[in-house]
């Protein structure tokens, strides 16, 4: 039981390049989330999904897109990376019923130059 | 605008000391408050407090929710170097399972 996994762990992009971050969970959770974490700002929700085939915008969705084609996977895409998107990205999942705690992946450190 | 504020932002104490971390919130339609510990990588869940469960305890850690004061505290007694981490507070609002996160308290325990 791996929990929540993320690939890749590290990535360096040039401005304007695109990439996709993959999140996978093996806990049969309904809800999945993408956050970014910047120093001194805590976790900010980018997008989330309440089930296969559904996604919704969070607090800071601009510049990102997501897809949830399979229940266990949640993809985060950057179409045209910008230096402001340099951050650590965390994926999380929760079962959608009590208890509501979210389980986090190990994170992806992204640097955009 | 919903917000969650943690204090202090950072704290340095010696092993064996007791620490109290604070979390205050202004969130519409409050459902629950959660505490997480973040060491080097992913945050890990500590406690969840709701209207029906305003105090939780696990070993040397305990947490209380004060719904009147819209705040929570996390106490750690007899601190150890392994308690060094960033402690995050988050509040769940409405029924869409989104969390509003505080910026965290960085706790450093000196031997």
Image (spheres, grey):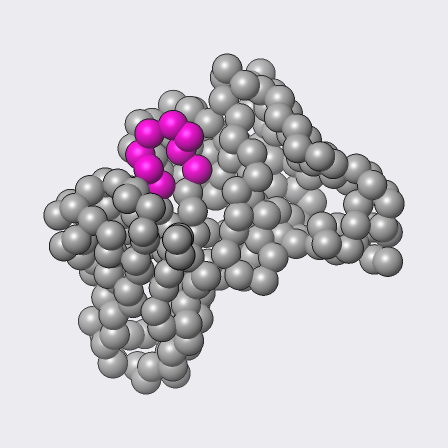
Query: Range of the magenta residues?
Result: A94-101
Label tally: 0
Quadrant for the C terminus of chain B, please: bottom right
> Left or right: where does residue B69 sit relative to residue A70?
right
- The picture quadrant where one finds residue A18 is bottom left
Indicate whether residue A109 is drawn in magenta: no
Res A70 visible: yes
B109 lies left or right of A24: right
**B2 up-or-down from B38: above or below:** above
Residue B33 drawn above or below residue A85: above
Secondary structure mostly seen in the magenta stretch? loop
The reply, left or right, for residue B46 in relation to residue B82 is: left
Q: Position of residue B85 (x, y in %)?
A: 66, 54
Residue at 51% of width from left, 35% of height from top? B34
- Residue positioned 61% across, 57% down in the render: B39
- Where, by quadrant of the figure, is residue A63 drawn? bottom left
Residue furthest out toward the front: A1
């Amino acid at each position: 039981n791996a929990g929540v996994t993320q690939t890749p762990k590290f990535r360096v992009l040039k401005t304007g390049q695109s990439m996709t971050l993959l999140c996978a969970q093996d806990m049969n959770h309904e809800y999945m989330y993408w956050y970014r974490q910047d120093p001194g700002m805590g976790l900010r929700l980018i997008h989330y999904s309440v089930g296969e085939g559904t996604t919704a915008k969070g607090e800071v969705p601009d510049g990102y897109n997501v897809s949830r084609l399979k229940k266990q996977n949640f993809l985060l895409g950057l179409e045209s990376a910008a230096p402001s998107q340099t951050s650590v990205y965390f994926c999380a999942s929760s079962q959608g019923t009590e208890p509501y705690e979210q389980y986090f992946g190990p994170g992806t450190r992204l640097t955009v130059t | 605008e919903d917000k969650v504020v943690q204090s202090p932002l950072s704290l340095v104490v010696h092993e064996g000391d007791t620490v109290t971390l604070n979390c205050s919130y202004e969130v519409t339609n409050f459902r629950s408050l959660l505490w997480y510990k973040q060491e080097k990588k992913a945050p890990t869940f500590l406690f969840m407090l709701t209207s029906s469960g305003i105090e939780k305890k696990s070993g040397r850690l305990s947490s209380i929710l004060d719904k009147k004061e819209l705040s929570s505290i996390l106490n750690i007694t007899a601190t150890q170097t392994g308690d060094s981490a960033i402690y995050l507070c988050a509040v769940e609002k409405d029924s869409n399972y989104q969390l509003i996160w505080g910026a965290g308290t960085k706790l450093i325990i000196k031997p």
